[in-house]
Amino acid sequence: MSSSRVAGVPVDDLGNPVPLPEPVRRVVSLVPSLTEAVAHTARGALVGATVWCAHPADLEVERLRGTKNPHVRRIVELAPDLVVANREENRERHVRELREAGIPVWVTDIRTVPGAFASLRRLFAACAFASPDWLARAEAAWSAPVPSGPRVAVPIWRDPWMWVGGDTYADDVLSRLGAVNVLAGGRYPQLPPEEVAAAGPDVVVLPDEPYRFTADDGPDAFPGLPSVLVEGRDLTWYGPSMTAARERLAVALAPFSRPEGR
């Protein structure tokens, strides 16, 4: 966004004006990573989240079903000052239903690491939350020089096989680790493992979400090709986990990295 306000009203990542009280005191989050981000920034403000919002582990708020089927009626009954959502995670019709009921909804659209930092800062400023220490530490962690990395393929689902493609947050994370995504042509291509192997990845990176790949479920599909298990939130979550995600992913990819210029 080129501007954070229109006629004095804060705007979300899609440019929608979102009139808010200052400060925002009651928040419902429909995105696991945003739940964690708000919890570590203004924990007392959270009054509701989805059943998939697993971090922080000790978060005690009302659970409002899932990201794709939120309990809209109950959210309206909770009368939050703000609902936070994401363009990719949540359905437009639910956002529309909440707005029609008079509930302000802030929609994020995050596809890069710098975009995550800018989006989160804009959200916190709109809510009149103090900028958190974890955000500054995450920015510092991701400002490190880009190393030389391997050619990678990253599945996110099995049956059908779906993969991290280009123009996604995970793809940008990989590029900032020096990795080359061999499937950067489309956003989430569906391809069988043998076609992906033919693209020449040095390693298949297997996250534990949204599909939970394990040592016994995933590597078997790529005979003769190395694979490595990683935390899915390191690849796809924007929030406090970003403070350590870069180092964890760099350690996981280092054994497969190509020498500079190779």
Image (cartoon, rainbow, N blue to C red):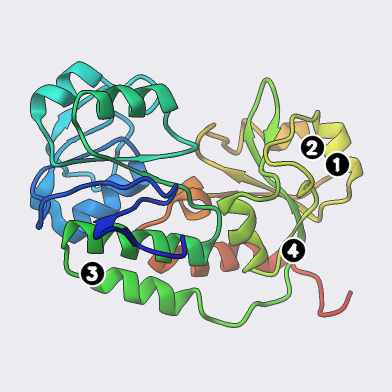
Q: Earlier in the sequence, mark 1 or mark 4?
A: 1
Residue ID for mark 3 = 132
> Is residue 96 toward the left or the right of residue 14 in the image?
left
Q: Nearer the viewer, residue 213 or 20?
A: 20
105 w.r.t. 43: above or below: above
- Where does residue 100 sit, x and y in percent of width and height? 26, 24
Query: Which quadrant: the C terminus?
Result: bottom right
Q: Are marks 2 and 1 in contact (CB under 8 Å)?
A: yes
Label pair 2/4, CB-CB below 8 angstroms? no
State how far apart marks 2 and 1 are (Cα).
7 Å
Alpha-carbon span between mark 2 and mark 3: 42 Å
Earlier residue among tags 2 and 1: 1
Q: Which mark is residue 222?
A: 2
Q: Residues within 10 Å of mark 4 (few under 14, many from 20)?
A: some
**Lateral position of residue 72 relative to residue 67, left or right:** left
Residue 161 in the image: state x and y as whole percent: 70, 28
Would you name the residue on which mark 4 appears? 256
Nearer-the-camera pick, 104 or 147: 104
Q: Which mark is residue 197?
A: 1
Q: CA distance from mark 2 to mark 4?
A: 16 Å
Q: Amino acid at mark 3?
A: Pro
User: Mark 1 is on which residue type?
Assistant: Ala
Q: Dot 3 lies on which element? A: loop
